[in-house]
Image: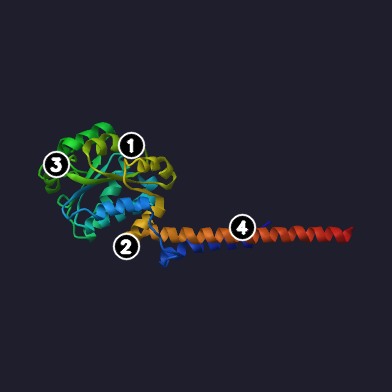
Amino acid sequence: MLRSWERYLLYGLIAFAVFLPLIFPFDVWENLPTREVLGVYNTIENLQPGDTIVVAVDFDPSSEPELYPMLLAVLRHAFSKDLYVIAINLFGPAGTGLGVMALNDVGGDMGKVDGEDYVMLGFKPNLPAVISQLNSDIKEMYRSDANGKSTADMPILERTPKFQGNIKYLVDLAAGETVRPWIAYGSAPGGYPMGAGCTAVSFADYFSFYQSGQINGLMGGLKAAAEYEELIERKGAASAGMNSQSIVHALLVIFIIVGNIAFFRAVMAKRAEARERA
C-alpha cells in the first residue's frame, strides 16, 4: 500500500510530465502522418491559389482540445496556399465563436482580410435544408455573417455565390453527427470532394466513409492534429499535447513495472517469513 509521500511523488511526476513539454517545447518523437491525414493535406496542397474551400466548424468548447488545433492547422495550410475560406457552423451556436476566433487569429497573422479572404457564417438549424440551400445560393441562406456584417456585397461571396460548381474542397471538423448530412446533402449532390476531422472516439464510426470513398481524408483526435502540424511545419498545441501524452504513458508503464516488482518482492518476503516461522 502506498504511503502518503509516495502518492504525492507519483502525482508530482505526472504533473511534471504534463507541463514540461508545454513550458519547454520539445519533440518526444516525430508525428508521422497516416494515409487518412495525408488525404486531407494533399487535397489542399494540390489546390491552386484563388480556389475556395469550406471549413465546417461543427464542434463546441467540449471538443475544443482535440478539434481546435486541427482547425488552426487546416486554416494555416489553406491561407499559406492563398486559398479563400468560407467557414460555417451547423453543430450549435457555441461553435460559431470558436470559428470566428480561429479565423481572426490565423487570418490576422497571415495578412488575410475578413470578408475578402475569409468569412465565418453563423449557426443555422435544420442541417439538410441549410446545406441544400448553400449548394445553390449562399446569400439567400445567410443575409449576414457571424459578426452581423451584410453578405450582400461581400467580396468573397461575390466570387463564390454558391457551393456547387465553385468550391474545391470541404472539410467538416465534427464533434457530432454532421459528417453524414454533409455527404448526403452537400458533397454528393454538389459534386465537390470532402474530408473530415473528428474526435478520437468517433474515428471508427467515420472510417467507413473513408473506406467507401465518400470522404477522401479523415483526421482523428489530437494525434491527427499533431500530424497535420508536422506536415505544415508549424507545431502548436496538438504537438505539445501529444508530447505530454507520450511522456505520461511512458511513466505509467514504468509505474506498473515498478509496482509489480514491489508486489512480488513483498509476496516473496512474506513466504520466506512464513517458512522461517514453520
Residue that appears at 26% across and 34% down: 185
* Relative height, residue 261 to residue 162 (above, below): below
Judging by the rendered image, the residue that carries numbered circle 1 is 180
Q: Secondary structure at mark 4?
A: helix
Mark sitting on residue 214: none
| Viewer-nearest residue: 141 or 98 | 141
Which residue in the protein does label 4 denote?
256
- Label 3, label 2: how many angstroms apart (C-alpha)? 32 Å
Regarding residue 40, the answer to whether it shows in the image is yes
Which residue corresponds to mark 2?
234
Label 4 Cα crowd, 10 Å radius (few <14 / some 14-19 / many 20+): few
> Which label number is shown at residue 161?
3
The spot of residue 223 in percent (x, y) is: 41, 54
Q: Quadrant of residue 78?
A: bottom left
Give, as a three-letter code, the residue at label 3: Pro
Q: What is the secondary structure assignment of the residue under circle 1?
A: helix
